[in-house]
Image (tube, rainbow, N blue to C red):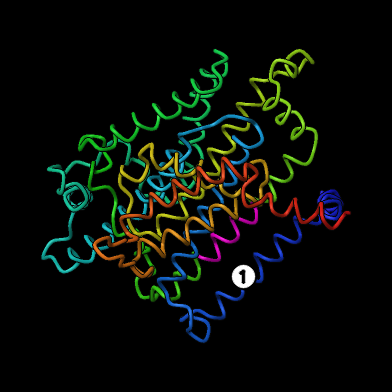
Amino acid sequence: MGGVLTKFLMKHPSILVFLGILSVFTLFVTVGSEAFGVGFISTSLVKTLGKTLCFCLIAIAMDLVWGYCGILSLGHFAFFGLGGYMIGMWLMYERTRLIVENSMANAALPPTPAEIQEAIGTQIFGVVGGAEIPTIWMFAHSLPIQLALVALVPGLLAFVFGWLAFRSRVTGVYLSILTQAMTLALALYLFQNDSGLRGNNGLSGLQNIPGLEAMPQSELSIYFFLLSALALGVGFLIAKLIVENKMGNVIMGIRDNEARVRFLGYHVETYKLFIFVLTAIMAAIAGAIYYPQAGIINPAEIAPIASIYLAVWVAIGGRGRIYGAVIGAALVSMLSSWFTGGQAPNIELGPLRVVWVDWWLVLLGLSFVAVTLYAPKGVGGLFDLLKTERSK
């Protein structure tokens, strides 16, 4: 197995180039951090960079399903959010349990398990007028199970949805509308207080990792940054393993001419379902790493507009190019943080005042239109031009 992988990497040196750049970048941030380095990179910036790497991972998933397989999914951020909710349930439950048990430790009589459970339920769900722990939280006490659910729940949802849609041979814009409807239905359900996930309040305090309360955020942020970089590297490698072999040729054939691929004897629905489920799991893993760094998740995070933004990132970076998806997500994410974080200087033009916090989405939309009209291959297409020029 190791020999096959080595041969594959030697055959595709671009993978080694990407992993090398990612490794150097990771080392640079670690050395420059406040926890393990000289301190010229703030903790907040480390968290922003870690979250950006998670966005790059879900962008790879989007590029696989859209750029290579031709399925314009407007629902992949729903899987991203579900991954966040699965790990968030354990984080919130375990942290609350520790707080409750510490507060009851000095009681005259030792608390019963039922009293502890009731106190935990009140702490978590009192904000939505409840005290009983919902059934969907039945495994929230177990980290291994919740980690498994990070992949299982979004994967199962993607499998059921994909099986029904692909079996009915829904394609094109109709499939995009269905994925968007799925996302909207999930978001509306989560907004309800009786969803079991605290409705509009969502899950908060996720940056406080149970058992690591004494660890400063500066150090914890580096660990999550390294985890984000590792997940991105593995995700990039998996994506390249898929697209650089026979399966990659088949899914690109499905994208370009589905009827012809079916005529050649390939079971198109199986390939599409596999890619859809795999990318849903990749998106969920990205979300599970992202939200402990963000600190909070609520239904607004998985609204349909978020999945549309994801498609914009991939289009700007250059769909059909795994590295293009990474470039697009990183570029837009960092620019978004700069413009919406108040770091971009406002422009005074007499009576007109340009406040970038308000104009950022307009700028993003114009960029998407410009790329679509004048650079359909995206930013990643510039590398193709450089290769062409060098080969002349």
**Whole-percent x and y of residue 118?**
18, 48
User: Which residue is painted at 75% across and 61% down in the image?
Assistant: 17
Q: Is residue 227 magenta?
A: yes
Mark 1 falls on what kind of element? helix
Callout 1, which amino acid?
A: Phe
Q: Is 328 or 366 nearer to us in this picture?
A: 366
Magenta highlight range: 225-234
Which residue is at the far bottom?
38
Image quarter (top left, top right, bottom left or bottom right) of the C terminus: bottom right
Q: Specify whether 288 is left or right of 126.
A: right
Compared to residue 31, the image places residue 169 above or below, namely above
The residue tagged 1 is: 25
Horizontal relation, residue 230 to residue 208: left or right: right
Q: Is residue 33 above or below residue 66?
A: below
Q: Position of residue 280 (x, y in %)?
A: 53, 37
Dividing the picture into quarters, in which one does residue 242 lie? Answer: top right
- What is the chief secondary structure element of the magenta stretch? helix
Residue 259 magenta-highlighted = no
Q: Position of residue 99 (x, y in %)?
A: 24, 63
Question: Is 387 in front, or is 116?
Answer: 387
